[in-house]
Amino acid sequence: MINRDTLLIGDQKTFTYKTSVPKGAKFVIHTPDSASNGVEIVGKPKFDTLSSNGGVNQIQTTIVVTSFDSGSHFVPKMPALVLRSDGSTDTIWFGGERVEYTTIQIDTTSYKPYDVKGQVEYPITLAEVLMWSGGALLLAALIFLIIRYIKRRRANRGFFEAQVADEPPYLRALRELENIKSQKLWQSGKEKQYYTHITDVLRGYIESRFNIPAMEYTSAEILRELSGRVTDEQALKVLRELLNVADLVKFAKYKATVEENEGAVPAAIKFVNGTYEADKESNIEKEV
């Protein structure tokens, strides 16, 4: 706190008052809620008991004031009440002191205005280059891992499973279907996941085998596209029935029977083998 006679606006000044108050009496001081006479009371008054002797307490009251207006001001007078236990009341007045507030004087005779300085440009440091380069590499690695995960998830393959080079679509589909069968998903109550994996494998196979964007197509759109390309009607029928059950399980909360669950993977394998054999025979005919 500042206790000099002349202060700069915004400075705070502390005043202390000592009052003798009988023991058992209440001591209450009322301060103004807002600025009075250009002076504001900062916070609440603080009370300290300095001594206690002969049934009388010596109370020190500390009041902090400030002002945001230059000039000569008077601290507002504040009544303090001493409420004795017998019901009598004494009034003591605090405040009334003069305080001087001033602003910083500017010598206008020597004052010279300057234009606003332009933005200072600092050279790029090695640390900044390394930071941004590292961030870019980290972002690229994260994008790569996300894309890899999505592709592996669609193909029902492990994230760290080695890529089989130039694996034919039908072999990849058959291997993934056998893997789904070994997971025993429907036996553990995961029917929706079971049929999702099967249909994802079939969609990936159809997309590679027939050049149809099956991953984005509905079951009806896939069957419509295949109707003019698959010559094996039995294989097409098997696929239609499998996709119908899968859609019911995934979207209509249908509870598949044990026979439907047991026959789902064999049906998918039958479709793959049927369309692969048809494709193989067609190629042989072309070669002859």
Image (cartoon, rainbow, N blue to C red):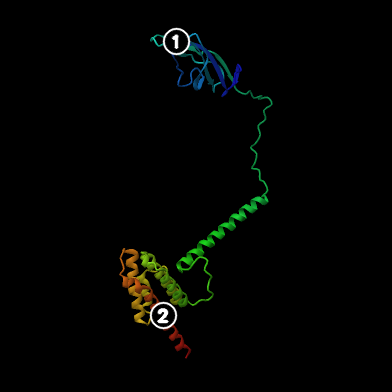
User: Regarding mark 1 in the picture, which secondary structure is present there?
Assistant: strand
For mark 2, does the 10 Å Cα neighbourhood hold few (<14), some (14 to 19), or many (20 or more) residues?
some
The percent position of residue 37, horizontal first and vertical second, equals: 50, 17
Q: Amino acid at mark 1?
A: Thr
Q: Is residue 202 left or right of residue 45?
A: left
The percent position of residue 162, horizontal first and vertical second, equals: 53, 70
Residue 136 shows up from this direction: yes
Q: Amino acid at mark 2?
A: Asn
- Among the 4 quarters of the image, the one containing residue 101: top right
Which residue corresponds to mark 1?
91
**Residue at image coords 61%, 55%:** 134
Q: Is residue 106 left or right of residue 193?
A: right
Between 164 and 275, the residue placed more toward the observer is 164
CA–CA distance between discs 2 and 1?
107 Å
For mark 1, does the 10 Å Cα neighbourhood hold few (<14), some (14 to 19), or many (20 or more) residues?
few
The percent position of residue 256, horizontal first and vertical second, equals: 31, 68
- Of the image marks 2 and 1, the number of the one nearer the N terminus: 1
**Residue at image coords 40%, 11%:** 85
Between 8 and 240, the residue placed more toward the observer is 240
- Among the 4 quarters of the image, the one containing residue 254: bottom left
- The answer to whether residue 215 is above or below residue 120 is below
Q: Is residue 86 left or right of residue 124?
A: left
Which of the labelled discs sits on residue 273, or is there none? 2
Residue 213 shows up from this direction: no
- The answer to whether residue 237 is above or below residue 43 is below
Q: Residue furthest right?
A: 110
Q: Is residue 22 left or right of residue 111?
A: left
**Quadrant the N terminus occupies:** top right
Between 206 and 99, the residue placed more toward the observer is 206
The percent position of residue 139, horizontal first and vertical second, equals: 56, 57
**Residue at image coords 35%, 73%:** 262
- The answer to whether residue 117 is above or below residue 59 is below
